[in-house]
Amino acid sequence: MARCKNDTLITKIGAKKLAKEVETEFTVHNYLPDCRRIIASKRLQSVGTYNQYAIPGNQFECMREGCVNSGTLYLNGATAEYKAQWDAVEFADGVVTFYTVGSEGTLTFKISDTEAMTNADSYTVDLSKIPTGADGYKAVVIDLAQAGTAIGSGWTPKHEGAYISIAITPASGETASAIGISSISIFDEMEDFETSATVRVACLSTLGGSWEMEAAEATCFGDAGIDVEAIDTFEKTVTGKAVTPNFHILNPLYGRGEATEGWDTTTAEIVIEEGTGDDAGYGVIVLADKYPGECGFMSVARADNCNVTDAHLVELIVPSKVAVDEKHFFVIEQEDGSAKVYFNEALIGQTMIVAYPQKVDVEEYVYDIDNVRYRKTRWSYTRTYTDGVKYRFVFDNVLITSFPDELTDEEGEFEFTVTIQKDATGRYGRAYRILG
């Protein structure tokens, strides 16, 4: 019998709301410095046979695009010697990397300030203990910060550069003609290999956004479809209240600097003393730990003055001593690294509140446009539906085009704008349905 109505419906699913334990992850890959690379064919003596097409895969960088390695020199039992033409003082405690192929034997690496290797540091590597890549190459790492075996008086780093030699003793049954080395690189420090880091954002309130596309201009027959020529990038938003401490690396401008000393503001109550010798006629405060070269961020005020405006003294920026009244002071840095603050002698014996840049040990990070050029950022998150089905979304080429840098008097949120671009395969991303 025919039905007049149909109350039977297909079951549906919905997207679960964001739970507090849900996280999203970003991985940031930086490129290794490329400034000190030696092609294996550039040996000092014409030994071995060079094959420019035998190029090892990159084992030091994750998902770097382009070819950074070069060909292979097959040693045929010889020792290969090279000139590292850069300032060796800069990489004296650095790292030398290269690739080997065809051997599980023993490698001997030497570094010296002369080609004769009379005085050198020697390092022995058991190649059988180094993992072999899918292409048959092994990546060798020589840490110059670790003491090698001294030959003669050992290696003395010099500004004129250094000489290195590489020799491989084959293991039993190996063919010498199949043993080779490739792609020698020199780095300043082991920290250069901090090329990959993952940032996690949790306690999320916003994750994702719409896939927005434009319709093409309609034709006479109405079959315009999506304007694929207009599809360029897609923008998403991530907002959360909890991040891992390394979240600063998501700022495209952010990168490591070189300074090991910097400053932080400190405040102290100090009594002005009477100047002696060349300082006679002045009131003087000595700051033994002021950061040298920093000419700003100095504040001085009388400690016992109830009128805040009148208590504040004004700094004179002068390179040598001048006459100074009771409302001013000036600072002269001393040869021993300290600094003297000079006042009118009428203030001798008074207590001053001094805020100044204090010298401290630091790790420096800089905001530089160069950091944008050598960085790849990837993004991933999961989404679960009401029937329990879970998907993992992965985007291998994204840009962080908005980075949070705001402080308020309320509990803060971190909001990132993510721009999704095509990856090396020409796709924007992919999704995995998790089956177990």
Image (cartoon, rainbow, N blue to C red):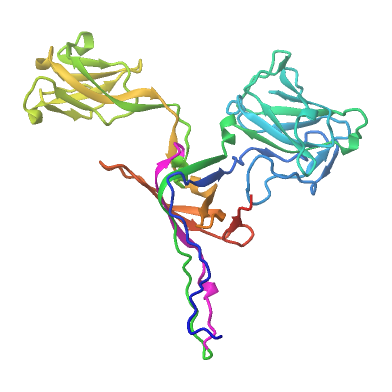
Q: Residue furthest top?
A: 277
The residue at the point 10 percent across, 23 percent down is 325
Query: Percent position (x, y) of residue 39?
Result: 73, 41
Residue 227 is inside the magenta segment: yes
Q: How many marks?
A: 0
Classify residue 197 by image quadrant: top right
Relative to 159, residue 338 above or below: above
- Near-viewer residue (360 or 156): 360
- Near-viewer residue (23 or 296): 23
Q: Is residue 109 left or right of residue 309?
A: right
- Near-viewer residue (320 or 40): 40
Query: Percent position (x, y) of residue 427?
Result: 60, 62
Residue 189 in view here: no
Relative to 100, residue 269 above or below: above
Q: Residue furthest right?
A: 173
Relative to 60, residue 188 above or below: above
The residue at the point 30 percent across, 42 percent down is 411
Residue 170 in view here: yes
The residue at the point 35 percent across, 23 percent down is 359
Query: Percent position (x, y) of residue 206?
Result: 40, 53
The residue at the point 51 percent across, 46 percent down is 25
Residue 147 is inside the magenta segment: no
Classify residue 407 by image quadrant: top left
Q: Is residue 208 left or right of residue 125?
A: left
Q: Residue furthest front?
A: 1
Q: Which residues are magenta?
A: 222-246
Query: Percent position (x, y) of residue 282?
Result: 16, 15
Q: Residue furthest bottom?
A: 220
Quadrant of the frame with the N terminus: bottom right
